[in-house]
Amino acid sequence: MAGRIPKEFIADLLNKIDIVDVVDSRVPLKKTGSNYVACCPFHNEKSPSFTVSPSKQFYHCFGCGSHGSAISFVMEYDRMEYVEAIEALAAQLGLTVPHENTSSYSKAKTVSPDLYQYLVQAANYYQTQLATATEAQNYLKKRGLSAQIIQRFGLGYAPAGWGNLADQFAVELHPTLEKIGLLIKNKLERYHDRFRERIMYPIRDQRGRVLGFGGRITNSQANADQPKYLNSPETPLFHKGSVLYGLYEAMQSTRDLKRVLVVEGYMDVIALAQYGIPYAVAAMGTAATRQHLERLFRHTSAVIFCFDGDNAGKNAAKRALETVLPLMEEGRQVKFMFLPESHDPDSLIREEGLEAFQVRIDTATGVGEYCFSLLQQDIDMSSMDGRAKFTKLASDLIDTIPVGAFRDLMITELGKRARIGQENLAQLAKTPLSPSEGNKQANGTIKSIRGSDGRPTPMRLAIALLLQHPDLIQLVPHHWQTLPEAMPGSGILHQVINLIREQPTHTTAALLEWWREHPEYNQVSKLAAMPISIPDGGVNAEFEGVLQQLMKLAIDYKIEQLMQKAGGEGLTPSEKQQLQQLIRGMKE
Ligand SMILES: [Zn+2]
């Protein structure tokens, strides 16, 4: 992994770049008042509800709710990863992106654009070799692959022999080729080809750059010690945990990826494309990681996992469920499909054809249904014990789902299945579902503090106001008495205050960006975009009022904590005194 990008650099980048330029170069903006508007590039609309604020360095669409900094915009519009977006923006300013704890690994990543070029040369070499490799061609023909599909996926062939590829490059380049996984250095310090007598599958990133290769043996009499499949090792360019085989090809085949099928191997991806399903991708020999899925959701809103019907497939499905639940944000759809035993997608679509396979995709099980049926499998739901166990297991999983409609639905469904009464269910939905929830709140999470009337709580309002109007910091008393840490949201509020005090020129965008890789990012981001209907002149008064409310809440909170302790383990003399003072203070 490349080292983290220092937060100071990102703040500085956002200070130097103007979001108006960034957006305007992609979506022409019109000035209205102090803001700029356009028709939103992220949803269909006729009248503009997409607004860019130069003072906040922030965009917000009132139609679809999308919002964020210049970095978010580039990520969403150019469909880039976080680090890529930062690099693209930095490049515009001629800045080099620094990485913390830079290892030789990440240095290689940032300094050698040539590496890609050598991989392309290798891919071209393998492709030309395929033209004369009879056995390999027969193998592909037997698999029913057309010349067109072979071309689309750039398949090639690595011939027998130890130095074929090595000879294509100058000797000085051999150490570099070793670094990108094409050559291997033996004990005698000599370099030889890693891939020999194999069909070669170039693995590309979503921009079409070759990162590495998968190689499959063709000859049946191959040595027993030769693995059937051989992938490039981890290199500065190729990271198994984040590359999805076939994503680039899928994106090339349709402008708008409505759904993506996640399968196991690259032959599955290619066979499906051959038979009319050009939207399959494969994780490279590993289970789909969070990184894989986050990347996928940037290109599509519907993901269908496809698993073999055997035990390995079932176990893989369970892991996929645990990985995907925390990513179930609004608008995302996930399904699970299981193939008949002893089949993989490659063999099945060959056997039953496109239409039957498509029916399987269309009737795949929704993530919620799969989740519950998995849990219920070994539980006797007719007994109370069974239902209690089920409730515990289910709430642990539901607890990982982000707050939103899907989570609410899952809680309702849990109630139905476990036969929990309306009242208890409301309790379940309102209070932390799992014991770990209490700890999360102590870390400053604020998801549970939606006001009961739907209006923002003082804590949310305070954070939102400060994020949107950082100059309100002047109204925060110097000796601002910190709120108890366990008060939901206090961690975030204190952090916002500290950030603005350290760097008074921070914009909304720069503040928000500080949370980018934190679990609270989504919440903070929503607060940064939260509409606050206060006339401009009234913002100061509103903020002062909210601060006072918070201080009062903090006192209530402390009193409650002390009372609870008094009823339990008892108070120390100084705590008794504190409690008396607090209660006296309230009466005054
Ligand atoms: Zn929109």
Image (cartoon, rainbow, N blue to C red):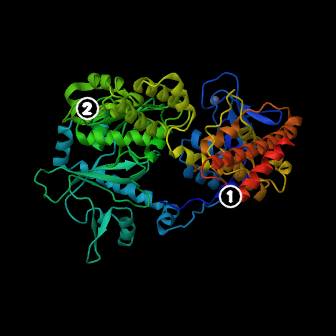
Quarter-of-image position of residue 65: top right
- Residue at image position (68%, 58%) is 572
Q: Is residue 203 above or below residue 168?
A: above
For ligand 1, which image quadrant applies?
top right
Q: Is residue 362 visible?
A: yes
Tell me which label, 1 or 2, sits earlier in the chain.
2
Q: Nearer the viewer, mark 1 or mark 2?
A: 1
Quarter-of-image position of residue 269: top left
Q: Secondary structure at mark 2?
A: loop
Rendering coords of residue 264 (x, y %): 30, 42
Location of mark 1 (residue): 572
The amino acid on which the numbered mark 2 sits, given as a three-letter code, is Leu
Quadrant of image for the C terminus = top right
Task: Say if disc 1 is inside 8 Å of ligand 1.
Answer: no
Q: Nearer the viewer, residue 39 or 199?
A: 39
Q: Secondary structure at mark 1?
A: loop
Location of mark 2 (residue): 339
The amino acid on which the numbered mark 1 sits, given as a three-letter code, is Thr
